[in-house]
Image (cartoon, grey):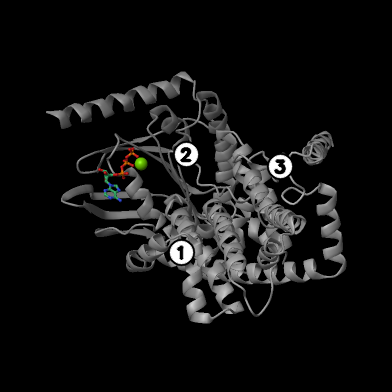
Amino acid sequence: MKRFLTALLFFVALLWLWHFLVDSGRWSAMLLPDPADVGKYLISAVKDGTLLETTWVTMKRLLIGYFAGIVVGIPLGLLTARFLWAHDTIGTLALGLQTLPSVCWVPLALMWFGQTEAAMFFVVIMGTMWSVVISTDNGVRSVPPIYARAARTMGSNGWHTWLRVILPAALPFIVSGVKQGWAFAWRSLMAAEIYVTILTGFGLGHLLHYGRELHAMDQVIGVMLVIVAIGLLADKVLFAPWEAFLHRRWGTQRN
Amino acid sequence: MNHVAAELAPVPCAKLVIDHVSKWFHSGVVKTHALDDVSLTVDEAEFVCLVGPSGCGKSTLLNMIAGLEMADQGSVLMDGKKVVGSGRERMMMFQESALFPWLSVLGNVLFGLKLKPGLKDSERLEVARYYIKLVGLERYERANIHELSGGMKQRVALARSLAPNPRVLIMDEPFASLDAMTREQLYGDLQTIWAARKKTIVFVTHNVREAVCLGDRVVLFSPNPGRVREQFRIDLPRPRDINSPSLAEHATEITRALKQHREVAAE
Ligand SMILES: Nc1ncnc2c1ncn2[C@@H]1O[C@H](COP(=O)(O)OP(=O)(O)OP(=O)(O)O)[C@@H](O)[C@H]1O
Ligand SMILES: [Mg+2]
């Protein structure tokens, strides 16, 4: 409760500072609108449905692409950790492509798939997948061999060992890889949406871009706030439970 | 018949025969002769301790009994049947705790039980709780592994090894990383538990006193290549106190023999 109050106080103070700076008149309201105006924009955008619609379009792209990236990435990572040939081929590919800033996939995706959903999914999947592959591979390699041996004496082998021993033992690595994948995917999706009009649906990035075209600074800042809120929400909903589990079981530090 | 009672009923202990076993390791250009023509019989419900200098192949032998490694020559037999792979009948406990950090104490003890067919989940739970209580950790069944002390971890490891009701228990320096006080307590507990759950035990240690305190027999190994040197029968009454003078006498005798072999080897 005390922590909540501190945080609340901080953000109220921040808003107040913002308002104070606008009030001082040193910036034109064109460049820095009052927080109240941003609030008004957000309310009207919720009322006329644009905000919910664009958020939905963006979230759909992000979540579907993201989970597809994980679902493909984890088995690939297991494969590269298990087989030397896979490590030398897929593993090397993953390492190379992971260093490629994921926004670089955007031009290629647009050429291949046009200004469509498929292109967006592709960008998100590429952003997510490679870091998931690499972290899974790293995680599996760093599992102490003694776990698998102990499991074997208890009658575990084959699939059972992979699913019940190796995978959970590699979990700390996998979670951090999945989290990194999220960051990459989210950034590259926003970049794509801001710079390219995707004909199959207008996302948050589009709304942001449109705000600039209209010189509607309240819209620009309002959409930015929504993007920040989604990032925070994802952290709380997608990662916090896993990190709490890791913290509880492994005794690792929560950050 | 009640499954839980059947599961907890004592299993007949197994007799182990290690029959002219030799083992080599190749790593790069180095070829290690880990075991050379080792023969050893462990009787039903016997507690045998293996001691010897580092590198004389004790762990290798245990791994072969567990079925985690295969002999290059000779074979390991359990009740006359050749050991060809690992299985619940022979459970192994390691020096460092090989407990799974992603599971609670209860989850760890249940791990092997879940792989045992023919039991209901509630029955598995009951069996697991029995062993957790046996090692004195009933208050900690929900605890996470990282919250336990070294001694408690090894107790959990013991419960986990005992839970599938194996016929042979293989222990590779299980107490080596513990402090002296914790160890002494565990010697007492292990003897009590062994009296309650009779098993054939093969136990490796560097600590001669520990071997004398626990073993019916102490087997001395020598390295390069690993061989059985000498055997000592320990006929002290149980439960034994690690600090008793008669135990110290045996330990002195064995330590002297150990030194002698080392000097012979050095010449
Ligand atoms: N997987 C392996 N690959 C190569 N050499 C090995 C392997 N395992 C054991 N060795 C070698 O075999 C010999 C016996 O090893 P082992 O671990 O059985 O000895 P130990 O008696 O258990 O020693 P310690 O008391 O230090 O645990 C050693 O020289 C060791 O280097
Ligand atoms: Mg060893």
Q: Quadrant of residue A226?
A: bottom right
**Residue drawn 50% across the image and 46% down it:** B98
Q: Is A26 left, or right, of A243 in this rendering? A: right
Q: CA distance from mark 1 to mark 2?
A: 34 Å
The answer to whether mark 1 is within 8 Å of ligand 1 is no
- x then y, percent, for residue A70: 56, 66
Q: Chain of mark 3?
A: B
Q: Is residue B216 above or below residue A188?
A: above
Find numbered disc 1 in the image and state the secondary structure of the residue it sits on.
helix
Q: Residue at 64% x, 59% y: name it.
A: B7
**Secondary structure under badge 2?**
loop
Q: Are marks 1 and 2 on the same chain?
A: no
User: In what quadrant does ligand 2 lie?
Assistant: top left
Q: Nearer the viewer, residue A61 or B153?
A: A61
Where is residue B129? Give x, y as percent: 70, 50
| The quadrant where residue A43 appears | bottom right
Residue B174 shows which numbered tag?
2
Image depth: mark 1 or mark 2 in front = 1
Q: Quadrant of the C terminus of chain B?
A: top left
Numbered label attached to residue A54:
none
Q: Is residue A245 visible?
A: yes
